[in-house]
Amino acid sequence: DITQLDTPEEAIQLYQQQREQNEHQSDNNHSDNNNDNEAILILGCGNSKLGEQLLINSFIGPILQLDISSKVIQLMTQRYHKYLSSDDSVVKRMEFMVDDASTGLTSLEPESVGGGVIDKGLVDVLHCSAGPISSKDDHDDDDHHHDDDMIQRIMNSVHNVLQPSRPFIFFSRSEPQWMLRRVFGHDGYDDYLISGCVNGSSGSRRRSKKLWKDVEVVKLVDYDLLLYKLVKAEKEDYTDQEDDDEEEMGTKNSVIERKSYLKRLKGGSKKSKR
């Protein structure tokens, strides 16, 4: 989970310690991007107060607020000037940037976000506007495929900037059987149903990479919302594709056998009733 301390003062103190440690590493020519930080990236921040609320509630930060609209970022920068002050008495723990989550989040370095990524509505809006989910073999509706592709590009962008074992959290009122199929694509959703993880191909050496793990869906009853949390898998989670294929084939065969058995059982029940 994203680290939350007891008081804002403790959060500021830990943030300063991490910043000093990272500056020390930089001075000693350490070029590793995966420095210790608790940065929280907010996708499509709009004019939301979420970023300020995270700081008030003792999250360490910094809070990276991102939106595709330069006008929105200009207004938010003016509103939260106190968090951006160069005054020595103020610890800068908020940043604003104009970027497009569907084109790679190029303003951020790969694996530079060490706290987590939060989306308060971007994925949900795209999901709702995309209409019915197309089948695997349906290539007729280009508009639907465009929206599906955009959501999956956003997922790839988030995966790229997150550090391993850090969460991506988003909210929706759509049920998992629809939202996760849209977010992962048909193949990724099948992976999730079989193993609880989401895989992706990695180059021409026929190896598969586990992209997401620990997929959780929590119902927020008071808000009539579903919270989706996906955790980026570790770098070491590479497995031999051929071994995966054999294991997956065995799993699918056993699923088919169970379905066939249940079908025969159901048919037998109908005959006995006659």
Image: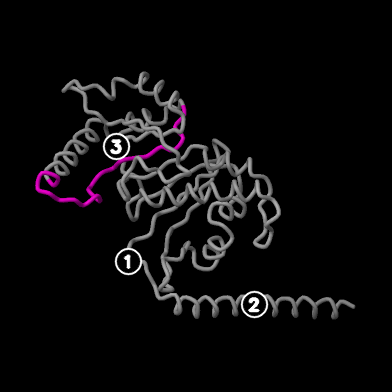
Please report the residue visible at 31 percent of the width from the left and 20 percent of the height from the top: 81
N-term-proximal mark, 3 vs 2: 3
* Magenta span: 25-46
> How far separated are the C-alphas under marks 3 and 2?
48 Å
Residue 188 falls left or right of residue 111: right
Number of the label disc, if any, that sits on residue 236: 1
Q: Which of marks 1 and 3 is in front?
A: 1
Type of the residue with mark 2: Ile
Report if residue 51 is visible in the image: yes
Determine whether the residue tagged by mark 3 lies in a helix, strand or loop.
loop
Type of the residue with mark 3: Gly
Residue 126 falls left or right of residue 37: right
Label 1 environment density (alpha carbons within 10 Å; few <14, some 14–19, many ≥20): few
Type of the residue with mark 1: Glu
What is the magenta segment's predominant secondary structure?
A: loop
The residue that mark 3 highlights is 61
> How far separated are the C-alphas under marks 1 and 3?
27 Å
Q: The C terminus is located in which quarter?
A: bottom right
- Residue 39 % position (x, y): 30, 41
> How far separated are the C-alphas under marks 2 and 1?
31 Å
Please report the residue visible at 58 percent of the width from the left and 52 percent of the height from the top: 182
- Residue 128 % position (x, y): 63, 41
Number of the label disc, if any, that sits on residue 256: 2
User: So how many labels did they put on this image?
Assistant: 3
N-term-proximal mark, 1 vs 3: 3
Number of the label disc, if any, that sits on residue 15: none
Please report the residue visible at 53 percent of the width from the left and 61 percent of the height from the top: 188
